[in-house]
Image: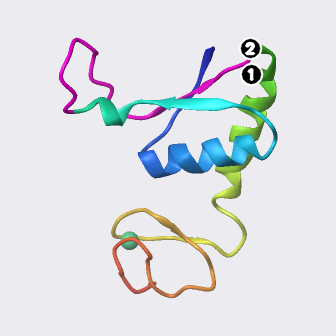
Amino acid sequence: MRELYQAKDRIEAQLLKDFLASYHIQTVVHGDYLIGAVGELPVQPFPVLWVLEERDFDRARELVKHFLTQEMADGDWQCTQCGECNEGQFNQCWNCARVRD
Ligand SMILES: [Zn+2]
């Protein structure tokens, strides 16, 4: 098992996990759910995606890169208030509801 990518939140981690699964690459997410857990596990503030099979790692890394650059597609805009990416067809930020400038 090999560490692939540290996601910014659980949602992104899950999206990537599903995305990679569609390419038959199995991953597990370790991370933020450990917050608040009792025990000796170190607290990991961000979810981290791990590739189960070493042989999938290089391909998985390429796919993640592709996935991340795809986020800002043509016509997308970035919210000036919260920094989220929004699709061009929307005139309001999905995250904080700020109207597009
Ligand atoms: Zn926003």
**Where ligand 1 lies, by quadrant?**
bottom left
The residue labelled by disc 2 is 54
Whole-angstrom CA distance, mark 1 to mark 2, is: 5 Å
What number is the disc on residue 57?
A: 1
Q: Residue at x 36, y 81 (%)?
A: 97
User: Label 2's element?
Assistant: helix
Q: Residue at x 62, y 72 (%)?
A: 76
The majority secondary structure of the magenta stretch comes to loop
User: Label 1's element?
Assistant: helix
Residue 62 occupies which quadrant of the picture? top right
- Tag 2: amino acid: Glu
Q: Quadrant of the C terminus?
A: bottom left
Residue 84: image x %, image y %?
45, 64
Q: Quadrant of the N terminus?
A: top right
Is residue 39 rendered magenta in the image?
yes
Q: Which residues are magenta?
A: 36-53
